[in-house]
Image (cartoon, helix red, strand yellow):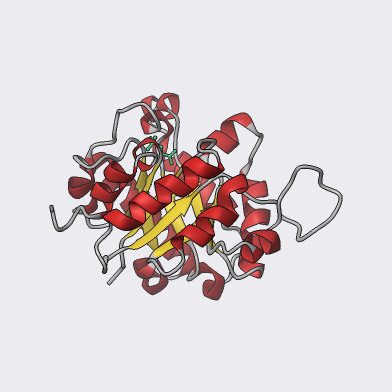
Amino acid sequence: MRKPVIAGNWKMNKTKLESIKLVTELKNLLPRTVAADIIVAPPFTALTYVFEAISGSSIALAAQNCHWEDSGAYTGEVSPPMLKDLGCRYVILGHSERRQYFGETDSSVNKKLKAVLRSELIPIICVGESLEERKKRETFSIVEGQIKRGLASLTSTEFNEIIIAYEPIWAIGTGETATPAQAQEVHQLIRKVLGELFGGRNAAEIRIQYGGSVKADNVAELMAQEDIDGALVGGASLEARSFAEIIRFKSGD
Ligand code: PGA
């Protein structure tokens, strides 16, 4: 049984005080026990404050990126041990915005993935096709390539520690969500590819999140799909009430 995992990616939003306010409101809105892993990924500048604010709650902390070395002459970068030190448990890797605007490639994702695992953090590896690629019917080959290159030379033991996020680029921040069937089709493909690489039993246990305009009113039908195990939420995670509603998708209360 795969435990649902709902993550909020705040991107480049929220100052220190805004971050504390958002996560404190979220904490107060959540029921005592939630049947999902809950993660927030604030900007680097707010990690320490958010960590303090979530203490004693079921919310865990993620960073949105990292470098692949533990330390060194890499001006402006942040390493996995530094993130671990601040209380992070997860790191998002290969988000399409990083691929699109900051030259992230499958090969840098692969190096970062190994560094994250070395620091005993859990990577959330994002993959997904552009609208143009989907129109050209290249979705499967693009996603398969991202998975194979991004996870290259990972051992089966390491594989068990990761989370994958399928985020079609055309659905991110656009209000246009993939239909549950469209998303399920790609999630199923991802699990099949993972099975070929790491064995069917391992692939059956790995959690695959969907991301791209997830909202309170579409999360339940997405989560009802067999191979969708969670959500990576951008815009709707910037407001406590909407994110809390997404987290409570099952109870409907
Ligand atoms: P969105 O972003 O929910 O605003 O579409 C998702 C993401 O980029 O992870």
- Whether 23 is drawn above or below 82: the answer is above
Residue 59 rendering spot, x and y as whole percentages: 40, 61
In the image, ligand 1 is in what quadrant? top left
- Whether 104 is drawn above or below 191: the answer is above
Nearer-the-camera pick, 34 or 122: 34
Nearer-the-camera pick, 169 or 34: 34
Q: Is residue 189 visible?
A: no
Nearer-the-camera pick, 95 or 226: 95
- Whether 101 is drawn above or below 114: the answer is above
Q: Classify the position of the N terminus by image quarter.
A: bottom left
Q: Quadrant of residue 86?
A: bottom right
* Furthest-right residue in this view: 73
Residue 214 rendering spot, x and y as whole percentages: 30, 40
Residue 99 rendering spot, x and y as whole percentages: 58, 36
Residue 7 rendering spot, x and y as whole percentages: 40, 52
Going 53% across and 75% down the picture, which residue do you hit?
157
> Does 49 sit left or right of 102 as displayed?
left
> Does 107 sit left or right of 15 as displayed?
right
Q: Is residue 194 visible?
A: yes
* Furthest-left residue in this view: 252
Nearer-the-camera pick, 78 or 163: 78
- Count of numbered labels shown in the rendering: 0
